[in-house]
Amino acid sequence: MADWLQPLRKRHLIQDATPLPETPQAIGAAYVGIDPTADSLHIGHLVPLQLLYHLAQLGIQPIVLVGGATARIGDPSGKKSERPLLPAEVVEANAQALAAQLQKLLPFPFTLVDNFSWLGSFALLDFLRDVGKHVTVSYLLAKETIQSRLESGISFTEFSYPLLQAYDFYALFRRYGCRLQIGGADQWGNITTGIALIRKLTGEEVYGMTCPLLTKADGTKFGKTEGGENIWLSSERTSPYRFYQFWLNQSDADIPKLLYVFSWKSEVEIEELLQKHEEAPEKRLAQRVLAYEMTARIHGEETARSVQVVSEVVFGTGDFAQLEALPEALFQQILREMPLYKVPSREVPLLEGLVQSGFFRSKSEGRQLIQQGGLAINRQRVPGGEVPLSTFSPVRGRFWLVQRGKKHLAWVEAPEG
RNA sequence: GGGGAGUUGCCGGAGCGGUCAAACGGGCCUGACUGUAAAUCAGGUGGCACUUGCCUACGGAGGUUCGAAUCCUCCACUCCCCA
């Protein structure tokens, strides 16, 4: 095994790889493909991008492919059933959104391509003659992703997906001398199809590598909230506060792996950090550092600072008065981190006001929560539903921080008065 | 085409004429303990009112009955077996 891979393995970035050349220079360029099935990346996409980043450090030219063509077909990998086709306009809009996000996100120069530019106008007969002829049906049928769908059904459309992706690899090999494709573990079948195609067409040796599907110590999938939602990179889909909290809440058991995978820090820095963390795990130092680094990277330093302030204030490690002292711009930012509910007046009984504003879905729900001691305003527990908002002194004249349990936060706004 | 089983709350799954807002398990929410961790324990989980009360709910529409998730009829859907 080529030893230039060792650091990457240490970072848990490699699950599987074809035999690789002795030096990274022999690879030339590497690509990762992302299908624009949504208008934002989520943190699962970051893993192969991290790998790409480290490969770039080794002198391999990084290429990111946005699958404007393949997203119109649908990748059967990892899916139990056929998926509805996305409208072409949606795919196009998504592709643009992803491209913009990638440009903002990646700290290194990379080549951005869209496979629509070569697949979009590929004539059917040409494709069947020049590409399809080189791959046998039995080869495709043997693929795990196809195999598992034979029972439940797979359309010809999805069946042909691996072939399209294989051609992408070939196209990039031709244009950029790209000899390596990376992807998530579920992409192995598609990647090897590309390798086989290139070998058939050119006799050249190319390579593939997959990243592990991250799991948490308890065996569940990493990258989803407890509710099962993805953690997205766009602030519209996942607020920066949520995003920060997601990292902060990772368990001790998972944090070393996460640092290795996601952090841009050097191995030495990570080891030092972990050592400090182990001396006093209750300080959650490693979680804090990672949460800050990730939030700053995705949402910017300023936002990262503001969500950090909120977190400290909310969880009691920071002084509540800090909110009063913040510059207006930062406070506005903080306001946007959580949902805002408007109450008609600061004198209506809390329970009623919070139901009207939509914070509680029903009076029963709110009453029960208050009875259990689960509602706090400005970090003070609410004793009963009859007291008005004005019992608590507002932040900046008209805002109150409402807290359901420990972690569910929102702002309530009442008219000045 | 023939025969059988089923459709219950967020999910799984009991209930088979009143005592059923519906056992039990999971999930979820809240609390205690804590490190915004893990584990554990406790309470809650249709709506309104809030001391016993009312309303809406057990695939849909009708019916029988003082009374139905429970019985009957029709309709819709799902699954299994045989051809």
Image (cartoon, grey):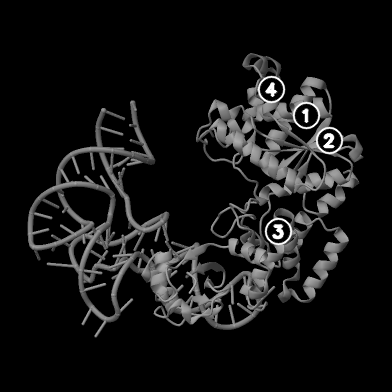
Q: Amino acid at mark 1?
A: Leu
Q: Are marks 1 and 2 in contact (CB under 8 Å)?
A: yes
Q: Earlier in the sequence, mark 3 or mark 1?
A: 1
Q: Nearer the viewer, mark 4 or mark 1?
A: 1
For the N terminus of chain A, the image quarter is top right
Q: Amino acid at mark 4?
A: Val
Distance between the Cα atoms at labels 4 and 2? 25 Å
Q: Earlier in the sequence, mark 1 or mark 2?
A: 2
Question: Where does the image place residue A21, in percent across and percent down from the top left?
Answer: 88, 37
Q: Nearer the viewer, mark 2 or mark 3?
A: 3
Relative to A132, is A416 above or below?
A: below
Q: Nearer the viewer, residue A69 or A18?
A: A69
Q: Chain of mark 3?
A: A
Q: Chain of mark 1?
A: A
Kindly identify which numbered label has been placed on residue A295: 3
Q: Residues within 10 Å of mark 3 (few under 14, many from 20)?
A: many
Q: Earlier in the sequence, mark 4 or mark 2?
A: 2
